[in-house]
Each structure stands twice: as structure tokens, then as C-alpha cells.
Amino acid sequence: MRIELLGAAIDNLSMQETVLKVTSFIKEDRPCQIVTLNPEYLYRAQKQSDWMRLVREAELVTPDGTGIVWACRMAGRPVQERVTGIDLMLSLMPVAEKEGWRIFLLGSGPGVAEEAAKNLKKQYPELKVAGTHHGYFKAEEEKEIVRQIKEARPHLLFVALGMPRQEQFIDQYKEEMQVPVSMGVGGSLDVIAG
Ligand code: UDP
């Protein structure tokens, strides 16, 4: 069930249900985008139609940010629980390890994605990291990065370029990349890298 809030439709799923949904996306034959919606994004999307379009077209929209959870409750349509980008990413790791899903980490400063991958592999030794790339690239380098991602054939792409760039990057290239599941994760790679 989706909850309508200020023009966006938010999926009312628990974390466990969200992980199951991702599993079903991976079995599907089309690229899916997950948006973890926070109040700042939703606020600005009121005036930026392209920001809103992207949310409306996303295959899954989770209630990130306590402000979203609160607003849904105030509107009389409470969500089951808050589902943040980092929590979802970390909840997917044991499943990725078990299912053999390859992950790609894009974004954050030089070396951060590699360090995050190393830490994830410490905890999930069988986890398959298809590739990493930092997030400080020029516009003209974008095509080459998209090519690298496509060639690495990950099942899951985590993009840490900050909001809304990460959402726009996925939106722009998802058809070309053909990654089953892509999501923006903000500062999560910095956190995981430690
Ligand atoms: N970032 C990046 N390239 C840029 C700008 C930002 O890779 O051109 C990274 C930055 O290093 C950080 C992440 O994007 O790791 C954004 O984190 P932030 O906490 O600002 O994102 P938010 O969660 O607020 O969207």
C-alpha cells in the first residue's frame, strides 16, 4: 500500500518487507530505482517538477527521515516504520552475501568506497563487490563511469553523491546501466568506511 503525501507516494512497508521487495526486483527483468525520501527533498520537490517526477516514477519510495514518518502520522496514514538508506543498505548485505548478489559502490571521496567495501567484506566475507568508484568526477567522465558500472553487472548499485544528484544520476542512467536495483545512500559510505 502506498501513502500519498504532498504529491509523493510512499511505500508503507516494514524493513523486512522492503528487503523482500528488493529481492523481487532483482528477479524482475527491468532496472528499479529506490528513493529514500526525506523532508528536505519532498519540500523542494514541491517546486521542482523533475524532482517530483523522479519520485513518482521510482519503483520504491521509503520513508526516510523522522519528518516524513511524522507527517504521515499527522495525515492519519501512519507508516509501519522508518526505512533509512543506510539501514536498508545494511539490511541488504546479508541477503546479498547469501544470494550471491554483486554490489557496486559509487560515490564519496577518493578511497572511501574501497574502504567501505573492505569493511563490508570483513563482516560478510562471501559478499561480491563488483566495483567501486569515487564520487568526484567531471561531467565528461560520467559516460565512462556508467560504462564501468554496466560492464561490472552488479545486482545492487549504491550511489553516494548527495541529494538530489544521486537520485538524478540513477534516473538518468538506469536504462543504460540495466542494474536491477539502484538507490541513493547519501553519506552512508562515509559511515561504513568509518
Ligand atoms: N559526494 C560526492 N561527490 C560530490 C558531492 C558529494 O561523492 O560531488 C559525496 C560526499 O562525499 C558524501 C555524500 O556524497 O559522501 C553526500 O553525503 P551527504 O551526507 O551530504 O548526503 P545527504 O545524505 O545529505 O544527501
Image: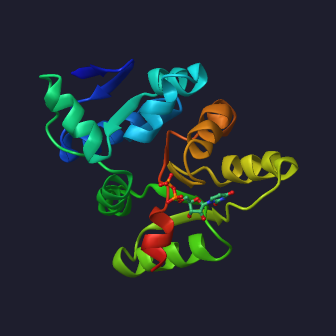
Q: Could you tell me residue 6's position as x and y percent?
A: 35, 20
Q: Could you tell me residue 3's position as x and y percent?
A: 25, 22
The answer to whether residue 47 is visible is yes
Q: Quadrant of ligand 1?
A: bottom right
Figure disc tally: 0
Question: In this rendering, is residue 34 above or below 166?
Answer: above
Quadrant housing residue 80: top left
Q: Could you tell me residue 180's position as x and y percent?
A: 50, 39
The image quadrant where one finds the C terminus is bottom left
Residue extending farthest right: 140
Q: Could you tell me residue 79's position as x and y percent?
A: 17, 34
Q: How is the image coloured?
A: rainbow
Q: Residue at x 84, y 52 (%)?
A: 141
Q: Residue at x 48, y 77 (%)?
A: 193
Of residues 167 and 5, the one drawn nearer to the viewer in this rendering? 5
Quadrant housing residue 19: top left
In-image side of 84 versus 155 (left or right): left
The image quadrant where one finds the N terminus is top left
In-image side of 183 versus 80 (left or right): right
The answer to whether residue 178 is visible is no
Quadrant housing residue 134: bottom right
